[in-house]
Amino acid sequence: MKIAFSASEQSVDAPVDARFGRAHYFMIYDSGSGEWQQVENSPNLNAVQGAGIQTAEMLAGKGVEAVITGHCGPKAFRVLKAAGIKVYTGFTGSVSAALAAYQSNELSEISGPDVEGHWQ
Amino acid sequence: MKIAVASGKGGTGKTTISTNLARVLSLAQKTQYLDCDVEEPNGHLFLKPRIDKTAAVTIGVPAIDENKCTVCGKCRSICSYNAIVALGNCTLTFPELCHDCGGCFRVCPSSAISEVRRTVGEVETGRADKIDFVQGRLNVGEVLSPLVIRHVKKYIQPDSIAIIDAPPGTSCPVVQSVKGTDFVVLVTEPTPFGLNDLKLAVDMLKTLNLPFGVVVNRADSGDRGVFDYCSSELIDVLMNIPHDRKIVEAYSKGELAIDVIPELKPEYLNLFTRIKERI
Ligand code: SF4
Ligand code: SF4
């Protein structure tokens, strides 16, 4: 299973980026192989509108099944939900700490967007 | 004759100038006032028009029939506004991002997309004494200001003097408002901020190749920067409005300055004469 973390730098030690659609990078962890993949989000991050939508679509295309980020707006949430991706928000530590918290079931899944649009 | 009143930033007195100018001109000739500051139209506060008609501004947005859609993704690829998302098993639309380009309707091979009308704003028309009054209003949360502005400008009558109150700034809605006008009046203040935003507005108008001049509000306060800039760039300063408590009071009560201070009338007529000389 693939889990995506919004990240401000391309490292597992980087903090989870509070923004989803306008995050600079995503670190994707594959729990099957135990490997990390780094994805640059710049094409989406610079979108005039719909950055969150595009980011969600990109992650769905990569077969991600869970997203861990700071906040998630309504449009991105709609896409993630339609793609069957679980969303966990509000985490502020590093990517590796977020993975550990996820693996020990300390994160709670959200059932709706936790911010208004434009946060993304 | 189409005259736009614009400013590089908000709060410079743009609405004061445009409403007073419209009122003065309407006493002698057919005059229109068109409020293109569609995110925050406020000319009506001073002109107090009677609104006779309201027309919705709508766009055609896609609605996808899941039963016909094969999720081929063609609509998504053509949409430059991120209004459509194609996931593996379904296609989602975001009508609030749609810019009405028509692309997705054209490319769908399965006739799965039908058009739904969606209202993004409105144009109100009426009269304010002798002024033919038109104002656009963008609905809250919508993004298509330029579209609403285009609809407002459709009401311009060639045999009238049209005073177009443009939004502040130098972005798309401003360009849409001043485009096709015969002259642009730039309203500014003699402060470093005023000068900075004036320069941006001047650059925009030079790019658009439109004739323009400057009106300096609260001209006797602040510094010389704006005046020095205008003289070195050979920009006409068409009118200086002194800082006057009576003008400020009229504004705060929603009254037109020329109604309270009749001595301002010849000043506005003179402004118009100077604009005419340039057209
Ligand atoms: S009409 Fe144009 S902007 Fe609107 S959804 Fe279709 S392709 Fe996108
Ligand atoms: S182009 Fe038509 S068939 Fe293809 S994904 Fe879009 S709506 Fe579905």
Image (tube, coloured by chain):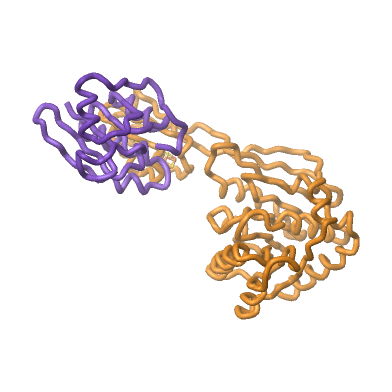
Chain colours: A purple, B orange
- Observer-nearest residue: B107 or A90? A90
Q: Is residue B37 visible?
A: yes
Residue name at image x 22 percent, y 45 percent: A10
Please determine whether, in this image, residue A81 is positioned above or below residue A29. above
- Observer-nearest residue: B60 or B168? B168
Residue name at image x 29 percent, y 22 percent: A107
Residue A95, quarter of picture: top left
Quadrant in the picture for the C terminus of chain B: bottom right
Q: Is residue B207 left or right of residue B226?
A: left
| Quarter of the displayed picture in which ligand 1 can be seen | top left
Percent coordinates x, y for residue A117 in the rendering: 45, 35
Residue B259, quarter of picture: bottom right
Please determine whether, in this image, residue B184 is positioned above or below residue A24. below
Residue name at image x 64 percent, y 71 percent: B226
Q: Is residue A46 left or right of residue B29?
A: left
Residue name at image x 81 percent, y 65 percent: B268
Percent coordinates x, y for residue B93 in the rendering: 40, 32
- Observer-nearest residue: B82 or B115? B82
Q: Is residue B75 visible?
A: no
Q: Is residue B171 left or right of residue B52?
A: left
Please determine whether, in this image, residue B178 is positioned above or below residue A4. below
- Observer-nearest residue: A52 or B223? B223
